């Protein structure tokens, strides 16, 4: 396996060094090919997502295929503009000269994608890498085997392997890839695996983008419009059965509105998923038995106030709400990544800063409030990757803003221009004129030269 990986990397390195990917026309043509391939494979992709995660066609298109197509289209539209050098101000001390920055592809990229949104979170970074002029080896998750096989088929028929290639498999293949030298590594997944990826990258001094996760809080204060808040919280939490890196991990609400909010959340679960969610064909499943058992294990039955039903044979868990939860409960010790929603309370809004300040920095932060001053203060003081005021999840559904974590929830970002930048190194270049050569920087240094230097550099 390692020999094949080495051969593949060498082939991609030779392809990159040929200079073909430096052409903007080549990149745009590649993006168009990718777009067409996704369109033509839509049915196969939707079937694979249904097999791996039980996703409905509507959810799969809305959250994976459609968003991937949107990102590819955005890259096609803007890559020519982004690839141009940008002039910057030149200090007078460097007269006569011009200064500019020029984006340059890193070279050979490794993209490691997760199982929860296995198509979107593979294709989005591929589109970014292509737009920036890189080659790429893609390693999809073994936990989503049908989607991984579909991605391999799609990419292998669209691109030569020396340009874009797929390596499937599990831990052995991951280890073989990470032992090799790449020019950039892009990883989406858990914190535990992210740490190992970063350790491996450090051995080669390879830059890495890590998209991880964490316990993303959802704050609801006493001014919030509770019916709407509940509707949007239920959507964001139970989308993909809670297996979303930016899902609200838990609700932290004002004690005065807890009962009303809880009633509205129960009402919304019924409206969105029906009286019997386990029989709802549009409600998915937990990815595998290991994760199913973990979720069942952190669910305190005595604190379940809604849902809690399971269908072990199909690895399904009802949208579940837990109340009277404390920070010491098992459900609060790790990222839930499933359809379990704990509800905690606070008495005064400023308490949230104390409650959250020692917690790991989450990937997302949500606040439901009608108090503009409070919203400004919270989004300024709290540290997190990205978030929403009076909604959940939708901040990542645009190519106009970068998406990424901070601290324990990741490093670096992508989507749109930010994604292009993530796979680019910006060269800083000074073009110096040859007709004039100011003598003050050259020895011998005299007082007169020192005065001029001080004057220019003030």
Image (cartoon, rainbow, N blue to C red):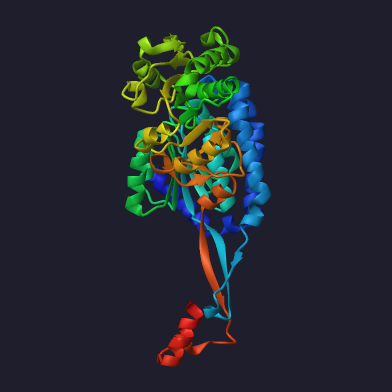
* Residue drawn at (46%, 47%) of the image: 412
Q: Position of residue 266 (x, y in %)?
A: 53, 13
* Residue drawn at (48%, 13%) of the image: 318
Relative placement, left or right, of 154 versus 358 is right
**Closest to the observer, 246 or 69:** 246
Image quadrant containing the N terminus: top left
**Closest to the observer, 456 or 13:** 456
Could one spot residue 172 in this view of the protein? no
**Closest to the observer, 380 or 13:** 380
Snapshot quadrant of residue 371: top right
Q: Position of residue 342 (x, y in %)?
A: 42, 20
* Residue drawn at (42%, 52%) of the image: 207
Q: Position of residue 214 (x, y in %)?
A: 41, 33
Question: Against 298, is 147 above or below?
Answer: below
Could one spot residue 202 in this view of the protein? yes
Snapshot quadrant of residue 119: top right
Snapshot quadrant of residue 156: top right
Q: Position of residue 286 (x, y in %)?
A: 45, 20
């Amino acid at each position: 396996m390692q020999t094949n990986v080495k051969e593949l990397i060498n082939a991609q390195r030779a392809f990159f060094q040929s200079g073909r990917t430096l052409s903007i026309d080549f990149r745009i043509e590649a993006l168009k090919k990718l777009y067409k391939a996704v369109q033509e494979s839509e049915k196969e992709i939707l079937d694979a997502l249904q097999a791996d995660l039980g996703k409905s066609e509507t959810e799969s298109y809305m959250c994976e295929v459609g968003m991937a197509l949107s990102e590819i289209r955005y890259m096609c539209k803007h890559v020519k503009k982004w690839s141009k050098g940008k002039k910057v101000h030149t200090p007078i001390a460097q007269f006569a000269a011009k200064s500019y920055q020029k984006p340059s592809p890193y070279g050979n990229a490794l993209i490691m994608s997760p199982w929860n949104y296995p198509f979107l979170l593979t294709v989005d970074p591929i589109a970014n890498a292509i737009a920036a002029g890189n080659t790429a080896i893609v390693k999809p998750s073994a936990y989503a085997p049908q989607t991984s096989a579909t991605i391999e088929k799609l990419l292998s028929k669209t691109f030569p392997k020396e340009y874009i290639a797929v390596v499937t498999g599990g831990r052995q293949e991951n280890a073989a890839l990470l032992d090799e030298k790449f020019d950039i590594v892009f990883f989406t997944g858990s914190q535990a695996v992210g740490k190992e990826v970063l350790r491996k990258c450090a051995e080669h001094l390879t830059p890495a983008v890590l998209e991880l996760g964490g316990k993303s809080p959802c704050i609801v204060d006493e001014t919030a419009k509770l019916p709407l808040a509940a509707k949007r919280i239920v959507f964001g939490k139970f989308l993909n059965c809670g297996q979303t890196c930016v899902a609200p991990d838990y609700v932290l609400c004002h004690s005065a509105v807890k009962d009303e909010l809880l009633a509205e959340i129960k009402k919304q679960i019924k409206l969105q998923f029906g009286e019997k969610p386990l029989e709802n064909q549009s409600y998915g499943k937990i990815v595998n038995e290991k994760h199913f058992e973990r979720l069942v294990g952190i669910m305190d039955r005595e604190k379940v106030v809604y849902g809690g039903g399971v269908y072990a044979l199909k690895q399904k868990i009802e949208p579940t709400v837990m109340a009277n939860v404390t920070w010491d409960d098992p459900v609060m010790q790790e990222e839930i990544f499933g359809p379990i929603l704990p509800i905690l309370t606070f008495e005064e809004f400023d308490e949230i800063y104390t409650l959250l300040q020692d917690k790991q920095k989450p990937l997302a932060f949500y606040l439901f409030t009608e108090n503009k001053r409070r919203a400004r203060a919270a989004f300024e003081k709290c540290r997190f990757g990205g978030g929403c005021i009076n909604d959940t999840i939708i901040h990542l559904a645009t190519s106009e803003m970068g998406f990424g974590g901070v601290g324990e929830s990741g490093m670096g970002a992508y989507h749109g221009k930010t994604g292009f930048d993530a796979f680019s190194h910006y060269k800083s270049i000074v073009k110096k004129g040859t007709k004039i050569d100011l003598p003050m920087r050259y020895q011998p240094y005299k007082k007169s030269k020192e005065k001029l230097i001080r004057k220019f550099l003030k």
